[in-house]
Amino acid sequence: MRIGGFLPTTLLDYPGHLACTVFTMGCDLRCPFCHNGELVLPEHFPAPLDEEEVLAHIRKRSKLLEGVCVSGGEPTLQPDLKDFIKKLKDLGLLVKLDTNGRDTELVKELLEEGLVDMVAMDLKADRASYPLVCGLPGMDPAPYFRTAEFLLSSSYEYEFRTTLVKGLHSAECISNMSSFLSKAEHWYLQSYAPGDNVTAFLTDSAAKPESFDREELHALLRIAQEKMPRARLRGIE
C-alpha cells in the first residue's frame, strides 16, 4: 500500500465511531477542488509511510479504536488494498471505504466478502457535468454511476456525498442528482473549503475554485430535497 498520510484518531471520518484514517496515494480524477491534492498529483506526492509501521500503530490501539477509514487519493487504485483491509479486519476493526466509485467490481467484492462495513462514495455531479467537475474533459462517467447504482440497489451501509463548488455545480445539476439519488438512504452536501493542498492551487490552473455562501448552500439543499428529502448539509451550521 502506498500510504501518504495517517490520522491516528478521528470522530469525523467514520460517523458514530472512534476511528483512525489511512490516506492512500494516487487518484484517477483531477477535481480542481480536491483538498488532498498532494495525494492526487504525482509531482506532489509525499514520502510514503511504511505500511508495517502504520499497522503496528493501529494494532497497539486496536482495543480503543472501533474502526479504520481507508481514504485517499483513491484507495481502489492500490493493488494490495484487499490484503491490507484483511489485516485490519483480523484486528476486529470496522472498515469504512472512501471511494469515487471507479471500480464497481472491487467495491462489490469487498462488501460481499465482509471486508468493508461501510462505503462513502463521492458522487461528484450529474452525468452531464462529470467531466468538468472531475477536471477531465471527455471522460466517461459510466463506471462511477454503475457503482452508485449498485449501492442504491443494495442493503449495505453507504452514503453519498457531494462537494459543492461555485461555477461547477448549478441548480440544474443538483436537481438531476436529486432525481438519481431519490431512493438513497444518505446524501450529504458539503461546501468546498480553500486550503494549501487544493489541487487547483498546486498547479498552474487559471480557474480557482470558489465557495458558495451559506444562503446559496441552503438554496441548493432545498433543490436537492425536492426529490431526495433525506439530503442534508454536512459541516455547515
Image: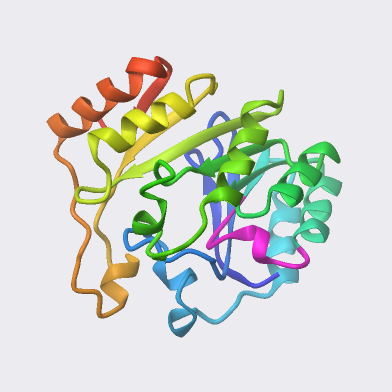
Q: Which residues are magenta?
A: 70-80
Please indicate, yes or no, whether residue 197 appears anywhere in the rendered image: no
Q: Is residue 108 above or below residue 78?
A: above
Q: What's the colour scheme?
A: rainbow
Q: Position of residue 157 (x, y in %)?
A: 66, 28
Residue 222 lies left or right of residue 134; in this view the side is left
Q: Residue at x 29, y 69 (%)?
A: 200
Q: Residue furthest bottom?
A: 43
Q: Is residue 165 left or right of residue 64?
A: left
Q: Quadrant of the C terminus?
A: top left
Q: Is residue 68 left or right of residue 79?
A: left
Q: Position of residue 158 (x, y in %)?
A: 61, 32
Is-magenta flag for residue 232? no
Q: Quadrant of the N terminus?
A: bottom right
The answer to which of 150 and 4 lies nearer the viewer is 150
**Residue 196 placed where, x, y %?**
28, 68
Q: Based on the displayed image, in which of its 4 quarters is residue 71 positioned?
A: bottom right
Residue 71 magenta = yes
Is 144 in front, or is 128?
Answer: 128
Q: Quadrant of residue 53?
A: bottom right
Establish if 41 lies above or below 88: below
